[in-house]
Image (cartoon, coloured by chain):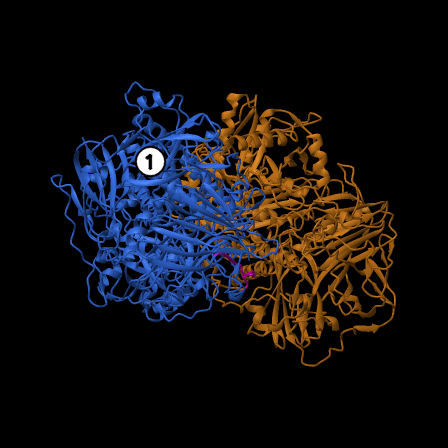
Chain colours: A orange, B blue
Amino acid sequence: MYISKSSTFVLLVSSLCLAVLPVKSSSGCGYDACNLGDPNKLNVHIVPHTHDDVGWLKTVDQYYYGARNNIQHAGVQYILDSVIHSLEENPDRRFIYVEIAFFWRWWNQQTNDTRNKVKNFVNQGRLEFISGGWCMNDEASTHYNSIIDQHSLGAEFLRDQFGECARPKIGWQIDPFGHSREQASLFAQMGFDGLFFGRADYQDIDKRTETKTRELIWKASANLDRRSWLFTGVLPNGYSPPGSFCYDIFCDDPPIMDDPRLHDYNVPERVETFIKAAHDEASSYATNHIIMTMGSDFQYENANQWYKNLDKLMKYVNAQQTNGSDVNVFYSTPSCYLYALNKVGRAWTSKTDDFFPYAHHPHGFWTGYFTSRPALKRYERLSNNILQVTRQLNAFSKANLRSSIFPLNEAMGIAQHHDAVSGTEKQEVAFDYAMRLSQGIDAAVDVINKAYDKILPLDSQTPPSGPQFLCQLVNISECLPIEGQERFTLILWNPTVHTISHHVRVPVTKDYTVRDPTGHVIVAEMIPISESTQKIPGRKSFAVNQLVFKAILPALGFSTYYFEIKATEKNNNEKQVVITQHSECILQNEYLRVEIDSQGNLNKITNLKKKISVPFSNQGFYWYGSFPGNNSGSEFQASGAYIFRPISSNPEPVSSKRSITCIKGQNVQSATIVFNNWASQEISLYDDAKMVEVEWTVGPIPVDDNIGKEIILRYDTDIQSESKFYTDANGREVLERTRDYRPTWNYSKVELISGNYYPINSRIWIKESNRQLTVLTDRSEGGASIQDGSIEVMLHRRTFYDDALGVDEPLNETAFGAGLVVRGKHLLIIESPATSALYHRVASQRFYMNPLATYALPPLPYADYSTTYRQTWSALQTDLPLNVHLLTFDQIDAKKYLIRVENYFELNEDDTYSHPVIVDLQKLFQSQGVISDIAEMILTANLRITDMKRLEWITNNNRSSKVDVKKDISLKDLNILLNPMEIRTFLVTVE
Amino acid sequence: MYISKSSTFVLLVSSLCLAVLPVKSSSGCGYDACNLGDPNKLNVHIVPHTHDDVGWLKTVDQYYYGARNNIQHAGVQYILDSVIHSLEENPDRRFIYVEIAFFWRWWNQQTNDTRNKVKNFVNQGRLEFISGGWCMNDEASTHYNSIIDQHSLGAEFLRDQFGECARPKIGWQIDPFGHSREQASLFAQMGFDGLFFGRADYQDIDKRTETKTRELIWKASANLDRRSWLFTGVLPNGYSPPGSFCYDIFCDDPPIMDDPRLHDYNVPERVETFIKAAHDEASSYATNHIIMTMGSDFQYENANQWYKNLDKLMKYVNAQQTNGSDVNVFYSTPSCYLYALNKVGRAWTSKTDDFFPYAHHPHGFWTGYFTSRPALKRYERLSNNILQVTRQLNAFSKANLRSSIFPLNEAMGIAQHHDAVSGTEKQEVAFDYAMRLSQGIDAAVDVINKAYDKILPLDSQTPPSGPQFLCQLVNISECLPIEGQERFTLILWNPTVHTISHHVRVPVTKDYTVRDPTGHVIVAEMIPISESTQKIPGRKSFAVNQLVFKAILPALGFSTYYFEIKATEKNNNEKQVVITQHSECILQNEYLRVEIDSQGNLNKITNLKKKISVPFSNQGFYWYGSFPGNNSGSEFQASGAYIFRPISSNPEPVSSKRSITCIKGQNVQSATIVFNNWASQEISLYDDAKMVEVEWTVGPIPVDDNIGKEIILRYDTDIQSESKFYTDANGREVLERTRDYRPTWNYSKVELISGNYYPINSRIWIKESNRQLTVLTDRSEGGASIQDGSIEVMLHRRTFYDDALGVDEPLNETAFGAGLVVRGKHLLIIESPATSALYHRVASQRFYMNPLATYALPPLPYADYSTTYRQTWSALQTDLPLNVHLLTFDQIDAKKYLIRVENYFELNEDDTYSHPVIVDLQKLFQSQGVISDIAEMILTANLRITDMKRLEWITNNNRSSKVDVKKDISLKDLNILLNPMEIRTFLVTVE
């Protein structure tokens, strides 16, 4: 049972007020509290830890409470209870905790007495929050906006409850299945001194083990240079203890039986085995410090078992020093281990690429989850869109309802988990994530309404205009509440800092006149909804047409479109929409020409202005058969939720024939190409568009041949891409990929397809000297360029085998009794490499910060409505420069705001915009008031940037990571400079 | 690794000095600390508990430490750690603990701080020790001597460490597989107010549930009457919680998810289900109090999980009282539940029979374990023999080495466990029990040596006579250290209070003259060791002969026999031993005549004095095939370690022919009858014997036909036994059994054989008006009378199937690469019913309190030896009356002794001895000094008998259980009266 009154949440996440005070590290915590070992010994840092998935086989609630233990024995409440008690028992003991989604729940249930105990442990450095996000986010399918948000959510909680001693200093991505360079860069910007993770490609690990380079400096951004450098370590045993030293309730390793009077006394054997394990581990690492991760998934439910045995083990191992042993073992934390490495003062190798894709054996490429659960991946991205708009509306309306946004914020925090948006959870858990987002959105809609109730009325006596509601199913052309209505309004909030034109499709059962905010009736064409859309299982709408029109939306503001039912069926003043079938279809506007032949083949796209033409061959849907297997060995690895392993390297076309319907209107021209009864695409060109929209629909994936299928959409061109392609990391910087190649080791290729897959969070491109095809995606997907000139993007997957990585279910999503149907969009950009960035940078930001459409059924006819309610509004007097993105605009309390602004262009990608840009922050606040106080913060807003002092590291070529401490911003000059790819974070007070 | 220096044990079990002080129950503990609920509600007593097997699938050490968790997850150290912490967290919480074998280990490792916490919990009645034995002993295969010892060992520890608040008041036999009347009687004598158990025959439970008589007054001894009455309750769910309310780490039941804001909130459903469970349970019980046992095997490793959920459950259930719920739930203990039942003040039904055999379904009779692991069962009984003798030697020598006896005492305490001597443990664990006993015996031999070092020398300047050693393999005629020696001594300590004659067999490789303590050379005949004995696998001896002679031993004392090698091979003065083969063999002395025909058939035994003759037919070995099965349902129940289920009701004879060897000497006449290469018996009649000895040898049980086999030795006679037979309980009182019948319910018979099996701890008989055949056993065995006139005793078992009750191994004992060979003895008594008791009572006591033979290799020739060392000695000036048994003689410290004396005859079984008898206690101490202080104690010696105040119960016929409080003994009159079957316990101080 869920009581959806979000206001009943105890909102400990409520205020960042502490953060604007200057802070100092307490001398009892942080690096000051570290044991740095003995320089003449092999120092073993024992790190007790638990890894608590924020949902996976069970829901986050079930994990927290320990419900459904038949699925997996795990109860986080007991872990925290238990660890706190064990810390009390011996002051040497330490523990780290990661997932604030769980810690927050637990904290809410504790007495003041317990809280004070915990605060003491934190202040003594004995309980250390590490990473400190709401979850340990996935790195392959997450968007940087949400990574920052989820880390900020955790950081804010920790800051509010514990202060500086609880500020995380280390990235701890022990479980995610591949590691993104952007994640590392963001960590650096969060003030982190290092990153540890557990999983890396087996070939990579082998080489690093051999060369003792498992620890290195990751240069995580060419744009941010040393500000993005991050010490990075690949942990020795994943995140598990060394063999036979697990003392958890889940483990069967021998306890330390140290009463020599009794049978089974095993101290000498255990000590000897441990000393050997320490030496073995040390042989793979460069210094005389090593780390042992003493814990694993949901361990420490009975911490006593762990600590009691560790206490004894350490005592007996250290006692051997009197017999000449060089092993010195002590309780530590990853931060202290990192600090000890730092104090060693050596130089480290570096790298500039990332850790994708991850394979744990020659046939085990974890590249399936880049696409797994595409509907959830889209819903997560859409939820972020709603979250960001809700924050803006809350802030610009001064509604001050931050606590009501918390449920969506929290649900998004949970959804970033590496078994959430990644799609690697059980089906029931996937449903739960979606339900949480849905409930969060419901709460957000309340805020949106309260905000519009303040913004819309022209005077304060005016009653609200009627509730605003979302139509979340417009992607299948369904908006039931407006069906058959005499009149309704559509308000579009543009969350970008730029005026935009935006084409809207409104599914209707009647024809309407549409007025823009000035009252003008605009061209709104009735375009038929495709038959295949109408047949999508679960669609309830009777609408067979959609009204398509172009909206012009002010920056950071809204426009209202007023719909009135037409008296007559047809308005003869309008140009007719022309529909043809089974014939050639040329979509053309002043910028682009798209040629599709009568068999439904996309043959060519021409950029008319740039005179660039890209011919396509065989564009369309293909499927790989999912490798079946019992996973009994590497060669029997099945394709599943994590793993993509095709049976063959040659994907099958989904059909030999296609049908084509060509629709030409004034606002849009489109070709609906139906490949078969489960795959179709609608290629659209809007009147002023500089890119081509491809809306794909896939599903139910047929399974009557008992073969799992992984569906791709492939764009084959003649671009001479020379094995190279480019994919983004988390929606920001783009990395060059080379087919069948890894930058840092001699890659043995076995899996020709899946070994070349990379995450696409927002874009993938191929290019040659003068031509570039860029594909933008509306969600995270996996993709590759398997042949020169070709881009393929995996859209959807349905498998019959579990891939034996824990989830224990095949990835077989169904709805309405059949395989799940998924729909999404690609945007195709045909430009020269020199001009592409301008389009893909701008478009990708608008793709995830889409205008938010809310509908209402106003009682008033237009004449009254238009005099009663505001129909357009902008927070800005003028647009901000095109390369500026408002990443965050969040009202903290009546007068305080948290904002992030970003230059979202990289260096050297655009002549105009790949440069520093100046923003006057006061401009963003013109409707809020005068900025009376301001502090620049680190990315997670939990430390003044002037207080950020990261550890200094030296790379092999003797370059130091040291950077100048930033100066604080002055109220006297609110013009801030944003370098390419720079995000700046501010806490602002207005009067 | 085991360091066998027993002296390094921290002997917390050291002193009973506290116990002689008058004690009062602290007002904070005991019944005073009980919540008695609400008389107008259904009161649910929540009893958190753990059931910690003192060895089963793992050894006691492994269970304590939590080692070998791959076999079974269980670590008692963590249970106790965890419970103590949870008790700290909420003063309402309670816990009970049972097995002091574990608690003692834990206690030894605690800090004073923890000990003080625990003491507080005990003093507040929140931690209650229940039963409080070293283990929860088996009831079917244990001997009363060892039951008392193991309970006393626990009681002494509790008394010493905690005082009166820790004195157990309740028997808690939740797991044993059937319940002995003697156990109940002993509990009553330990001052217990009640007994709860979990297992009873399914038909019995059904009837009791229907008639609400699961709680009753057990009249446990016809001899002791109301002093043996014990309130007894059959628990509602075995010892588990009601369905879906288990909150242990082993359980998957839903936790209480009580945050209504989160998914999976389940409080209303859980409360409703609990209230229903309470009402369901109440429908089977007579009062408005019910008990819920919240725990199970090795539960509470993480007590927090249990208590946290119980706290919530109870809060929410009780909150429903405001909505009219009648359920009142609270933390309690079995004692408090019992006290609440007592306060209800109603009358209860009673019963006088026992709870054997136990069946959990129509084919599931737990009668196999009466015999399982017959070698371990014998070794356990022998170990007790050694323990009691060691105590006597320690006491009479005033060696004051009680702490060195502790290892054997402790090993015996562990061996009483219901998966130890019962034979229902894994093989590895059985080996561990045996090793513990062996190590205990090694330590005891040290004490024996120190005692003899004090006793033997005639003056204090004399050096020790050389180390005394045991020859534990004399049962297979092997004593390697004496083989080929020129001279050696054999000292026999008689632990009974009566002078006895005792025939000794000493395996030798040379012929020896044997001198009695007076120096006379006595008749010692060289009797050949049978070929089948010589071939027993593992036998290393070269001896082919044994010297047989009769020793006369003083009461509570010893005689030394001196062996000197004979100069010539033969002494012509001696009468020849006559050996014949394949011919009739009549064994006869002045009392008995045993007729065996030339085919090896025992045809008749005649009691010549009484002129009673019993013909036998087909006497010999038979086997039942063990039912094979996958245990998938009742009908597929396999025969295994617990269960005896024969394939057929007609056992097969082990052979169709036998060979016979007849040996007639002066001291012994015997017939060695070999049935086949794995079954033989040697029937012996000693010169002055009034009973016939049958030494049986069985094994390796052949398995080449892949049929498990259960071997019996059957005695078929013409006695008109009319379906009745008689078996003892734990070596004391005898119960009448009727074939295919149960005294308290209408028995549906399905298993014709195993349903009639009962434990035989010492004896079984059948009788008619003038004749009785009594078979005495040297260990616990299962047996029955399947036909009138027949007694069968199961000797040995070897099965191929596990019986699916947890042990997960077939019972397939092997040694030296083949099935285990087991050897043992029966004594047959042919008397009238009126005279049988005299023989079987005396013989059964001597059987388990056999003279202890120790050997030594003295350097001195006889002439010197006899003038240097004492050769005989008795602690008594005169024998005590024949019906007096010295059960315990234990030196506590320099001046203190714990003794128990017993009249071991029942009422009405012997004209002379079934009467009260007087013993002058000073006589037992004549060699120790003058008794200067004495207190009579309850059986476990942890309370003065004058302080014992048991609860009063009323039976249905309105009889009260109340008895007069015993008067304390006075130093002025140390003559104490022992009524039939009465054991009296005293703490004695001598000057």
Left or right: where does residue A736 sit relative to residue A507? Answer: right
Element at label 1: strand
Q: In this view, does A331 lie above or below B839?
A: above
Task: Indicate whether residue A367 is drawn in magenta.
Answer: no
Left or right: where does residue A328 sit relative to residue B791? Answer: right
- In the rendered image, residue A245, in percent from the top left (x then y), is placed at 55, 38
Spot the residue most to the bottom: A568
Occupied quadrant, residue A480: bottom right
Occupied quadrant, residue B198: bottom left
Q: Mark 1 points at which residue?
A: B493
Magenta extent: B620-632
Residue at left offset 54%, top offset 44%:
A251
Callout 1 crowding tier (Cα within 10 Å): few <14, some 14–19, many ≥20: many
- In the rendered image, residue A805, in percent from the top left (x then y), is placed at 65, 51
- In the rendered image, residue A921, in percent from the top left (x then y), is placed at 59, 45
Left or right: where does residue A102 sit relative to residue A635? Answer: left
